[in-house]
Image (cartoon, rainbow, N blue to C red):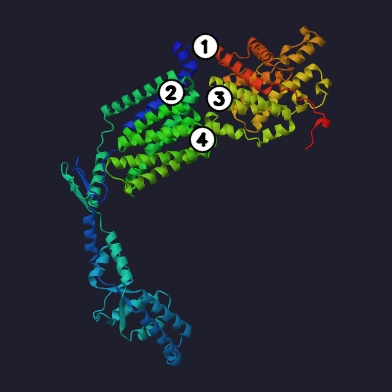
Amino acid sequence: MADEKEKPKWQRYLSERNLGKRLLIGFAILMTLAVFIHFKEVRIEMLELDSYAKNYIVAQVDFSFPDDEGTVILKQESARDIGPIYRIDQGMLDKRRYQFENFLIHDQRWRNLLPNATFEELYQGADDVKDLLQSLRFSDNRTLHRLQSLDLLTPEYYPLPSSFDGQNAVFPDGFWEVIQKRLFKKNHQSANITYILSYFQQTDWVLDKDISDQRNLRREVEATVPERFSQIKAGNRIVDQGEKVSQRHVAMLQAMKKAMTENQKIWDPLPLLSSLIFATIITLIGGYYFRNSHKELFYSAHKLLLFATIIILTLVIAKGAEFFLLRNTGGLLEVVRYPLFVPFAAILLCVLLNAEIALFSTCFLAVILGLSLAVDHTRFIAINLITGVVAILASRNLRKRKEVFVVCGKVWLTCIPIFFVYNFSQDVFWNLYTISDLTSTFAFLTLTSILVVGLLPILESIFRVMTDITLMEYMDPNGELLRRLSIEAPGTYQHSLVVGSMAEAAAQAIGADGLFCRVSALYHDIGKLFNPQYFTENQMGEFNMHQLLTPLESAQVILSHVTEGEALAKKHGLPRHFIDIIKEHHGTTLVYYFYCKMAEQEGADAVDEKAFRYPGPKPRSKESAIIMMADTIEAASRSLQEPDEEKITELVERLIREKLQDGQFDDCQLTFEEFQIVKSSIIKSLGVSRHIRVPYPQRDSNQIPSR
């Protein structure tokens, strides 16, 4: 305390209620909003191809655009330089190769001319000659010159012989000399190659057109033609009203948008100041709303950070999707006209915080995204606002993770009438845009459901948030701990079920988390699994195990179920909130029965009261205090003889009064009014579970009428 007083006043002020952390989180939200609002993409109305322009459009800046029509003409002209491509007839090559082989077999004079040659060498050489001639292509000099200028000419291309008459050709000696040099490189003996070529040289050759090679060459030549750009001056009309939209018009609009984006003055001080002021106004409005309507969020740095994370994550996803769509060259921008970003944040906020916060945030997000993204502002805001509200309404009672897909399915069904409303406003019932809008929103909502299902456990773990989805998973009786509890300590298990039911009803009565009370109560006594026979609810016979122990030893066994329960919970990875309930459900109360027995034996002055008290801490939440009351009262009510409303009421009031006098509820933030409501709820629940039935008279078997 002395150190606290020595701190400067401003430091003490910032440390109160985590003000420093909350201001830092608020500043992060403000700056993210400012950046998001300031760095806007330029939006220009993009016309559908082959549609008719409703208004004329004028160039707002000087720009150049890729003239596809002009580029196509240039490519066609360049391709015309490529003449016919020829190759030696395949059948004729095979025939000549076969004739040469027969010649070697039937005419042995070659052995005298080539004394060092073998049949296999000549056979292989003939194959190589055939393969080489088969790979050659022939064309006119203009074509070869064009290929050479484009660096596309390869050694396989040769000029057509002057003797070519359109079908047959005789290759000159110079041609065969070149072929001979190429074959020498394959380690053939020069005499063998000369002999083989002399045989192949003694004929006219048929040349066939190679249509496939000519087509490929033309494509390669066309690919070398650079894209043509045309210049447009500001003020020039791009498209006239009523004019049919061509690909050229679309290219001009896209180029103008790119030029306008590059000319944005995003670093000028006044636009920067404008974005900062707008973001500040939004942040202050949000802060004012949360301070007055959701204090549990405003004064909790933990929850505020979770809220900021979801909002910032939504803005980042929206900006990233916009960046991808605007720079995609496959026409996705025309398909995804109404991207749905708000339902993502709406579902997360509703599940992790509450529906009211999600609804407020949905309204602001729809407006901010609609004004800042390159979209049709009015329609984007409308559809995101409506789908966000539907997502919240459908998410309020989520109990299983797979139900997120059902929620997104309901949101998508909501989109269908909205798109028809948009169509009807333009005097259209159905068009291609309707199909693309339905498809794109379905894709967005599918991705949304996958992201939400994937992020929920991560956010729950990081921010230690217990959602109804997680709670329902922990309520499964087939879980290891609950299954063990029901088998090894059945009395404790039944006690936990009743405590959970009572605590849930009481929590709901004051607006606390009833489902959390119900589920966490199932685990509050798991420490009794270590010594279940020492607890009354699990003792089946008349023998009491505590008769074998001293009062102090008995107290230690009873007290240990809290610490052992905490250790068991940590071992099985139970949430921090459950562990808090295990530690707090007895607070620092006294094990009064064994304390009194010890005092009787040793004397009150000789007994250390601390040895008989639970380690605590005291309940620090409303839910923890409710479970403490339900646990204490349910256990004590089992000793009531012939319980009625008066006895139950007296028991409840006495036990709660004792806890209050012992200071067990000092840290739980329950108001006096809430205590009265909780008390009434527990009395009602206990009355239902402990009601007396009318005793049935025993029937004499002799009096049972026969049929």
Disc 4 crowd rating (10 Å Cα; few below 14, some 14-19, many 20+) is some
Label 3 SS: loop
| Pointer 4 with pointer 2, Cβ within 8 A | no
Distance of mark 4 from mark 1, alpha carbons? 39 Å
- Please identify the quadrant where the C terminus is shown: top right
Q: Say whether residue 184 is left or right of residue 229.
A: right
The residue positioned 33% from the left and 71% from the top of the image is 156
Give the residue pinned by disc 2: 24
Q: Which mark is residue 513?
A: 3
Disc 1 crowd rating (10 Å Cα; few below 14, some 14-19, many 20+) is few
Amino acid, disc 1: Glu
Q: Say whether residue 616 is left or right of residue 410.
A: right
Give the residue pinned by disc 1: 4
Distance of mark 4 from mark 2, alpha carbons? 24 Å
Say which of 483 and 411 sits in front. 411
Distance of mark 2 from mark 1, alpha carbons? 22 Å
**Above/below status of 249 relative to 30:** below
In front: label 2 or label 3 = 3
Q: Which mark is residue 178?
A: none
| Pointer 2 with pointer 3, Cβ within 8 A | no
Amino acid, disc 2: Leu
Give the residue pinned by disc 4: 456
- Please identify the quadrant where the N terminus is shown: top right
